[in-house]
Image (cartoon, rainbow, N blue to C red):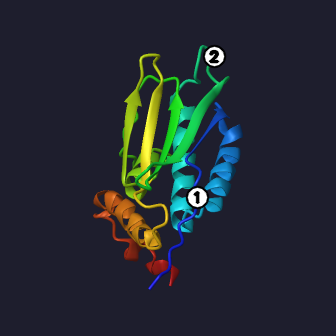
């Protein structure tokens, strides 16, 4: 029987992150420290930090900065909160872009395009919200219970789910034959 001690988790946190890779590490460190300090399980913290990183990377690659600044200047907004039901919600808001956020179907050898698929596999739910100023927010319900001691169990299925999505392209390959000469 696991003993779960409920601790006070900061209700919310919001920060401006430079539009580009420079601020992503600061955002991850701040989130990790706040959530751990609030007693959120390590598995949920790890998932939340990975999700935040993917969302910020997508916002910087595909979205514009907030406000009227030129591309590459300005900020995007990162926020996370634990709602009254104990769900951890992460949001990243940018100035919008030429396309809507949607999971891609990258080839096996592609260097990118897996971020929203990773988020789909890790999260309880996610979606996109637009506002009248042209801002786009991608929100993610990371986990329904921030103190869940069994949250790590779900991670065991993530690799299998991501691998399974690539299997149709690999079905015709005989990898054993490719390695016979190495024996």
In which quadrant is the N terminus drawn?
bottom left
Report the mark closest to the observer, 1 or 2: 1
- Residue identified by numbered label 1: 8
The secondary structure type at the circle numbered 1 is: loop
Q: Residue 32, percent across and down?
A: 64, 56
Q: Residue 93, percent across and down?
A: 52, 32
The secondary structure type at the circle numbered 2 is: loop
Q: Residue 30, percent across and down?
A: 68, 49
Mark seen at residue 162? none
Q: Is residue 164 above or below residue 26?
A: below
Q: Quadrant of residue 50?
A: bottom right
Label 2 environment density (alpha carbons within 10 Å; few <14, some 14–19, many ≥20): few
Q: Is residue 58 above or below residue 115?
A: above
Q: Earlier in the sequence, mark 1 or mark 2?
A: 1
Q: Is residue 80 above or below residue 45?
A: above
Q: Name the residue rendered at 53%, 34% in the picture.
A: 59
- Residue identified by numbered label 2: 70
């Amino acid at each position: 029987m696991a003993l779960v001690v409920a601790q006070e988790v900061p209700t919310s946190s919001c920060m401006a992150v430079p539009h580009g890779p420079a601020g992503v590490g600061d955002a991850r460190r701040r989130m990790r420290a706040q959530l751990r300090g609030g007693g959120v399980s390590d598995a949920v913290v790890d998932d939340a930090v990975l999700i935040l990183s993917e969302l910020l990377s997508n916002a910087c690659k595909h979205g514009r900065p907030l406000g009227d600044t030129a591309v590459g200047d300005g900020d995007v907004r990162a926020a996370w909160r634990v709602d009254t039901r104990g769900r951890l919600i992460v949001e990243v808001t940018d100035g919008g872009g030429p396309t809507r956020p949607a999971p891609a179907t990258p080839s096996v050898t592609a260097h990118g395009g897996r971020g929203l698929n990773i988020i789909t596999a890790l999260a309880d739910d996610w979606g996109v919200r637009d506002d009248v100023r042209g801002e786009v927010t991608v929100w993610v319900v990371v986990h329904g219970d921030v103190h869940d001691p069994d949250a790590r169990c779900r991670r065991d299925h993530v690799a299998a789910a991501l691998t399974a999505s690539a299997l149709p392209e690999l079905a015709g390959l005989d990898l054993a034959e490719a390695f016979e000469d190495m024996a």
